[in-house]
Image (cartoon, coloured by chain):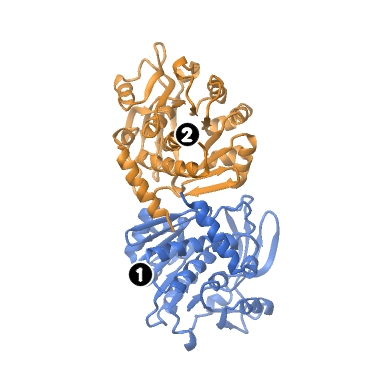
Chain colours: A orange, B blue
Amino acid sequence: MILATGTVALDTTRTPFKTVERVLGGSASFFSLSARFFSEVSIVAAVGNDFPASYWQSLENSGVNLSGLQKIKDAKTFFFDSTFSFDMYSRTANKTELNVVETFTPHIPDSLKQSEYIYLGTLTPEKQLAVLREFSNPKFSMMDTIEFYIQHSKSALEKTISEVNGIVLNDIEARMLCNTPNLMKAAKALGKMGPEVVIIKKGEHGSILFYKDAVFPIPAYPLENVIDPTGAGDSFSGGFLGHIASKGKLSLDNLKTAMAYGNLMGSFCVEDFSVSRLLALKKTEIEKRMEKYRELTRF
Amino acid sequence: MILATGTVALDTTRTPFKTVERVLGGSASFFSLSARFFSEVSIVAAVGNDFPASYWQSLENSGVNLSGLQKIKDAKTFFFDSTFSFDMYSRTANKTELNVVETFTPHIPDSLKQSEYIYLGTLTPEKQLAVLREFSNPKFSMMDTIEFYIQHSKSALEKTISEVNGIVLNDIEARMLCNTPNLMKAAKALGKMGPEVVIIKKGEHGSILFYKDAVFPIPAYPLENVIDPTGAGDSFSGGFLGHIASKGKLSLDNLKTAMAYGNLMGSFCVEDFSVSRLLALKKTEIEKRMEKYRELTRF
């Protein structure tokens, strides 16, 4: 079983083609709606009193365990308003209201303390570490982070990195954190900090896995139309960790297939706004795209 | 047999680690020193009276047919002086002396007119077209270009593109030429101009092939140390077209393997300055790396 912490958020997302307001977002939402296709998954997070009942229902109906999702009466939900550039390659934050995320400290209900796979979605590195330490012996823990913590909480971040089994971050973050333009060198440096699994996401260029002495670069599933890139990274992590949890053990083969599922789940996520595509998705569509992916990348 | 036109140049290359002066460079040099591992290859180009005999000897000793390489008495060799940034990801031109390239019009000796595979390395689009038209019925012709001609000779460039079978260019050039940030859309637009094979190179992120309805993205061979990126693109083309020429027919399978050889030849090229690595390379090293490449990318 997987436990995911992070944010359950409201997003206002402006693209050159359309704007959607206060839609369901957040790292824990995207992660769990992706991971649910592979394994049982629970969210530990908090929302405020403005969180729409329909969003709660959507998460619950999709099979995500919400026993660790708290609704805080006197608080508002994390809110993020952003605009994508014309080419959809860069995003400008218009407004970030931390709200409930600022004061909330994730607490793991006893019923979820046996979770074997832990995803530490973006929160402060201190909170990520606090969550991790509530588990006595997880099989595999994986974290994500953002530029803000690399710039402002580097030593706390390094402490958390030293205690997880895996880290997933994008190429810009990896270069920034490790002070090198070379991703191979960045990955080595990250591995020396602790995690045995290092994953660097490169958006449209795919992703790279580093595990022991192995390097596994994998191209993205080719897409002509990207509607909304929000959540692609956490959807990747959901597919990746979901597959690992379903297999029950780390091996290079399992990790490679997990990378492919991660890329695929990211490719589905960006095909519609918010979590819409992940909610509508069927397992058979994933397997069909996987077959096509294997076929088209083979040489 | 492959015929390559383009430049045979002298490069001064400045990297953060080392500077090399007036070393052997140019699109036709890199292309043919790469392609020679797969097929017979001839160069049609010109150098000036300052071209070192030792460079001529290196090309000749490596098995490249130089019967179409002219030494022009009253001219100097194309010269390019450039500096790589600290991170090796961008290059600044310090000096470009066209010299013999400006006045020289490539002329195909009769003995080479039966060449079946034609590589039009970077020259003006008008000269590329003139070379192409000297062949009555080539099996496959492929061109490269540079930003300068996209910006300054767009209609001539489109004319040449409409007459070749394949085009290879990098992601920045593809986006610029087709006015779209999306590489899938750019490739479709390029295909509509004429070529049935469209290849977009993405440096450290690998490359993508578009052929009929098929898309084949392939990651780069992972390298930790890049010494000098000069010539990687033409080395790619040499491996690609070399493999196609050795197979004698286009098929999706041959094209995919050709892409892999292209990426591999690029990966060898950047491991040393100028053409040094290509000159020292052995066919067994290529096959060994190919085996490793297949193994590490498989999932």
Q: Which residue is mark 2?
A: A248
Mark 2 crowdedness (10 Å alpha carbons): few <14, some 14-19, many ≥20 = some
Quarter of the view holding residue B178: bottom left
Residue A155 placement, left or right of B199: right
Which residue is drawn at the image coordinates 61% and 38% (left, top)? A191
Given this view, does label 1 or label 2 mark the residue nearer the observer?
A: 2
Question: Which amino acid type is shown beneath numbered disc 2?
Answer: Gly
Q: Which mark is residue B162?
A: 1
Is residue A76 placed above or below A4 in the rendered structure?
Answer: above
Q: Nearer the viewer, residue B201 or A128?
A: A128
Observer able to see residue A24: yes
Q: Quadrant of residue A11?
A: top left
- Image coordinates of residue A244 in percent, x first then y, are 46, 36
A127 up-or-down from A179: above or below = above
At which x and y percent is residue A100?
Answer: 45, 18
Q: Tell me which amino acid carries mark 1.
A: Ser
Q: Chain of mark 1?
A: B
Q: Are marks 1 and 2 on the same chain?
A: no
Task: Look at the numbered disc 2 and give the secondary structure of its residue.
Answer: loop
Residue at horizontal 37%, vertical 46%?
A290
Q: Is residue B231 visible?
A: no
Q: Which quadrant is the C terminus of chain A positioned in?
A: bottom left
Q: Nearer the viewer, residue A97 or A182?
A: A182
Question: On the rendered structure, is A73 left or right of B111?
Answer: left
